[in-house]
Image: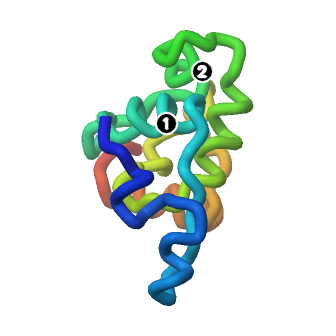
Amino acid sequence: MKDYSKSGLFGSRVGAKRGLPAYRTPSAFQAKVFAVVKNIPRGKTLSYKEVARMIGKPGAYRAVGNALNKNCNPEVPCHRVVRTDGSVGGFNRGSLEKERILKDEGAI
């Protein structure tokens, strides 16, 4: 797994010194979620519940959603995680944008 703490994408106040947003290093839980989500191929989706199961925390599907909502790394395709019923669910740029991206990728 990539170490974001040294990449400049995450890190306590590191980016702020260079005029970039200061992202925080993801928690261990967030790092696990991001690692799973980074491997969802274009045109495919997983549910929040499936991601939670894959990281060994089957009841933590709401926490998965919260982790994804706080994600600032564009390499993590958060839009590819949907609700168990197949509806798009939330997205930090709005559910209509999430739906548009998923349609463009052929996932829905």
- Helix, strand or loop status at disc 2: helix
The quadrant of the rendering that contains the N terminus is top left
* Residue 78 point in image, percent of width and height: 49, 48
Q: Nearer the viewer, residue 14 or 87?
A: 14
Disc 2 from disc 1: Cα separation: 17 Å
Q: Residues within 10 Å of mark 2 (few under 14, many from 20)?
A: many
Q: Which quadrant would the C terminus be assigned to in this image?
A: top left
- Residue tagged by mark 2? 49
In the image: residue 92, left or right of residue 25: right
Residue 31 spot, x, y in % from top left: 49, 36
Which mark, by number, is residue 31? 1
For the point 73% across and 31% down, the residue is 62
Give yes or no for contact between labels 2 and 1 (Cβ–Cβ under 8 Å): no
Residue at the extreme bottom of the image, as rendered: 19
Residue at x 54%, y 66% (from the top left corner): 97
- The type of residue carrying mark 2 is Lys
Count of residue discs? 2
Scheme by which the image is coloured: rainbow
